[in-house]
Image (tube, rainbow, N blue to C red):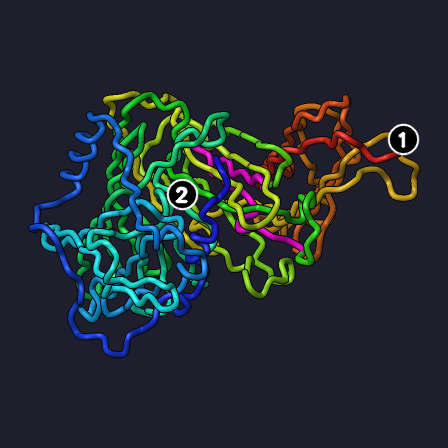
C-alpha cells in the first residue's frame, strides 16, 4: 500500500460542507439536473450480469484526458469550486436525501459515471458547468468539455443540508460520519495485494446508480460497478439513517485472474502515536490517531483487542478464523483531554464495525501497519481475507453491514481494555541488571465492579519469546477496574517482533477480552 497520496483530497470529507458548498437562495422547486442518453431498465441482477460480462474481457484502463486548466489546479484552487445545492439530485423534492457531485481536477483525473434510477429505469446524469460555482478557481466552466464527468459524490440528509453524512471519492474509497457528524477513517470497496512487496492494486468504482428513495424513508439505495485489472464487481449499498449511519453492503465479485491477497470489507485509518506507542511523540498533542485498536469478535465467541502501532517498518498480522462475527477499527479513547486538538477533534472520530451477513467460512482478519511520519497519511489497513485465493470464472458473494459511530453495535460482556502503556521495565529504586520492557494494560467493565477484596484475579500472559516477569493485577479506581502489569525480558538481541497475549482470569474463567500486542525490541537498548 502506498501513502494516502490524495490525503488532502480525502480531507474534503473532514471539512464542514458549508465551506465547500454554498446554499443558493434562488433554488427552484425542481431539480436542475440534465440527463443524457435514453432511459434503460436497471436492477441489481442486471448489474451483476454486467460485471460478470466485463470480467470476461481484458481490462481497459480509464481515460485520463483532463484539460490542462484542471490538471494545473492547486489545492486552494480546487477547493474554490463549489457545488450549487439547487442542482443536487432530488433537491426540493420533499425527500430526506440529496446527492451532490465532486468536480474533476487536481488529483482526480478519472471520471465516474452517475445515473439516476427511478421505477426501474436508469438515465445518466450529464456534467453541466451550471452545477458549479467556480469562484476563485480561475476556471471558466463554459470552456470545459461537455462530457467531463464527475469525480465522486456526497450524500446529505434532511436534518442538516450544510453537512454531508457520506462521501465516495477516489478509487473505491468512501466515508461516513457518526452521530457527532465527524469524519475519520475510510472504508473501501475492495483491497487487492495490500501490504505485499509489489505495488497494491486499487480497484475503482466506475459508475453509480442512485435509486430515488421513497418519501419519508430514512433509507437510500446506491449501486456501484467496480473494475480493476484483476477483478470486477457489482455493489449494492443500502444506507440507513434511522439511528446512526448503517450501510448494508452486498457484493458480487468476478475475478479476471488468481488473486493472492483479496481484502473483503477493507478499512483504512491513521495511527501516528498514542499512550502505547510514543516512537514519534514530538508534537504538543498527547495523542494523534483516527483509530486506536482493532477489535475482533471471533467465530468461537472470543473477543480480541489489538492496540494499533506506528511501526518503524511494515507489519503484517493475520488472525485466522472461521465465520467471524465481526471486526472493526475502533476509536475507544473519546476523551478530549487525551488529544487536546480543538481543530481535528480526534475524540469524535467514528469507529467502523463490520458485521458479516451469512457464513464467510474460513479465512483471516488481516492487519497491516505501515510507518508514517505524520498524521497526513493513512497507515492502517484491516480486512477479511478468504482462505482460498479467488480464481478466474468464479462468482464470489459477500454481504456485510457497516456500522459508523462512536461505539460498535455489539460489545463483549467481559471487561474490556481501555488503555495500553509501555515503557522501561525494572523495579523503581533498584539497580537494573538487564534490559526489560514494561506493559501496563487497564481493564474496565464486565463483572469487575462485583469483585470482592479477596478475589484472586490472575493475568494469563504468553509471549512468543522472551521471559515474562514482575506480573501483577491491582485495582484502578480511576476506571473502576483493574490494572495488569508485567515486564518482558528479551532472551536474545534480535529485533524481530514479539507477540504478546493477555487476559484476566478468576477461578479458571475469563474475566476480560483478550489483549494482543506486537512489540519490537529496540536495536539500540538503553544502558543499564
Q: Position of residue 277 (x, y in %)?
A: 67, 43
Q: In the rendered view, would you say 184 is above or below 4?
A: below
Query: Magenta segment: does it hold 292?
Result: yes
Q: Position of residue 198 (x, y in %)?
A: 47, 26
Q: Secondary structure at mark 1?
A: loop
Give the residue drawn at x 33%, y 23%. 390
Residue depicted at x 25% and y 32%: 60
Q: Is residue 279 left or right of residue 9?
A: right
**Is 306 a magenta residue?**
yes
Q: Secondary structure at mark 2?
A: strand
**Quarter of the image where one finds residue 119:** bottom left
Q: Is residue 183 left or right of residue 500?
A: left
Residue 335 visible within the image: yes
Mark carried by residue 433:
1
Magenta segment range?
286-308
* Other residues around mark 1 within 10 Å, as few (<14) / some (14–19) / many (≥20): few
CA gap between label 1 and label 2 equals: 47 Å
Q: Residue beneath label 2, please?
A: 354
Label 1 vs 2, first from the N-terminus: 2
**Which one is nearer the viewer's eye here, 23 or 166?**
23
Amino acid at each position: 500500500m502506498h501513502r494516502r497520496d490524495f490525503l488532502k483530497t480525502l480531507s474534503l470529507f473532514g471539512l464542514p460542507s458549508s465551506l465547500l458548498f454554498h446554499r443558493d437562495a434562488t433554488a427552484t422547486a425542481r431539480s436542475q439536473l440534465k440527463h443524457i442518453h435514453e432511459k434503460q431498465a436497471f436492477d441489481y441482477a442486471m448489474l451483476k450480469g454486467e460485471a460478470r460480462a466485463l470480467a470476461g474481457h481484458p481490462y481497459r484502463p480509464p481515460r485520463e484526458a483532463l484539460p490542462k486548466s484542471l490538471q494545473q489546479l492547486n489545492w486552494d484552487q480546487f477547493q474554490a469550486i463549489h457545488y450549487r445545492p439547487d442542482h443536487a439530485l432530488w433537491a426540493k423534492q420533499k425527500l430526506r436525501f440529496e446527492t451532490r457531485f465532486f468536480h474533476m481536477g487536481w488529483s482526480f483525473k478519472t471520471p465516474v459515471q452517475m445515473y439516476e434510477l427511478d421505477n426501474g429505469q436508469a438515465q445518466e446524469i450529464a456534467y453541466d458547468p451550471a452545477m458549479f460555482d467556480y469562484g476563485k478557481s480561475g476556471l471558466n466552466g463554459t470552456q470545459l468539455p461537455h462530457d467531463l464527468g464527475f469525480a465522486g459524490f456526497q450524500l446529505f440528509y434532511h436534518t442538516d443540508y450544510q453537512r454531508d453524512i457520506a462521501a465516495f471519492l477516489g478509487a473505491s474509497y468512501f466515508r461516513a460520519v457518526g452521530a457527532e457528524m465527524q469524519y475519520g477513517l475510510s472504508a473501501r470497496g475492495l483491497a487487492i495485494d495490500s501490504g505485499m512487496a509489489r505495488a497494491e492494486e486499487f480497484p475503482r468504482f466506475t459508475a453509480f446508480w442512485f435509486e430515488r428513495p421513497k418519501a419519508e424513508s430514512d433509507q437510500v439505495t446506491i449501486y456501484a460497478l467496480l473494475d480493476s485489472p484483476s477483478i470486477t464487481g457489482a455493489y449494492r449499498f443500502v444506507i440507513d439513517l434511522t439511528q446512526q449511519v448503517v450501510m448494508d453492503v452486498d457484493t458480487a465479485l468476478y475475478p479476471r485472474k488468481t488473486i493472492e491477497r483479496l481484502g473483503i470489507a477493507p478499512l483504512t485509518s491513521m495511527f501516528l502515536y498514542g499512550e502505547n506507542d510514543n516512537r514519534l511523540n514530538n508534537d504538543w498533542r498527547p495523542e494523534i490517531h483516527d483509530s486506536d485498536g482493532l477489535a475482533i469478535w471471533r467465530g468461537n465467541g472470543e473477543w480480541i483487542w489489538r492496540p494499533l502501532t506506528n511501526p518503524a517498518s511494515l507489519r503484517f498480522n493475520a488472525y485466522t478464523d472461521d465465520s467471524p462475527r465481526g471486526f472493526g477499527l475502533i476509536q475507544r479513547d473519546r476523551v478530549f483531554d487525551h488529544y487536546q486538538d480543538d481543530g481535528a477533534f480526534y475524540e469524535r472520530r467514528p469507529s467502523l464495525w463490520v458485521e458479516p451477513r451469512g457464513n464467510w467460512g474460513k479465512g483471516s482478519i488481516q492487519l497491516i501497519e505501515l510507518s508514517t511520519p505524520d498524521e497526513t497519511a493513512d497507515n492502517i489497513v484491516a480486512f477479511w481475507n478468504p482462505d482460498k485465493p479467488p480464481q478466474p470464472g468464479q462468482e464470489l458473494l459477500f454481504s456485510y453491514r457497516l456500522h459508523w459511530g462512536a461505539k460498535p453495535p455489539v460489545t463483549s460482556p467481559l471487561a474490556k481494555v481501555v488503555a495500553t502503556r509501555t515503557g522501561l521495565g525494572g523495579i523503581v529504586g533498584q539497580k537494573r541488571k538487564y534490559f526489560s520492557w514494561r506493559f501496563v494494560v487497564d481493564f474496565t467493565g464486565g463483572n469487575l465492579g462485583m469483585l470482592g477484596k479477596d478475589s484472586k484475579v490472575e493475568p494469563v500472559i504468553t509471549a512468543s519469546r522472551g521471559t515474562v516477569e514482575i506480573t501483577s493485577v491491582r485495582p484502578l479506581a480511576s476506571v473502576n477496574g483493574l490494572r495488569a502489569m508485567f515486564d518482558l525480558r528479551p532472551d536474545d538481541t534480535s529485533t524481530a517482533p514479539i507477540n504478546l497475549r493477555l487476559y484476566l482470569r478468576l477461578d479458571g474463567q475469563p474475566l476480560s477480552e483478550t489483549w494482543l500486542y506486537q512489540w519490537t525490541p529496540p536495536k539500540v537498548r538503553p544502558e543499564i
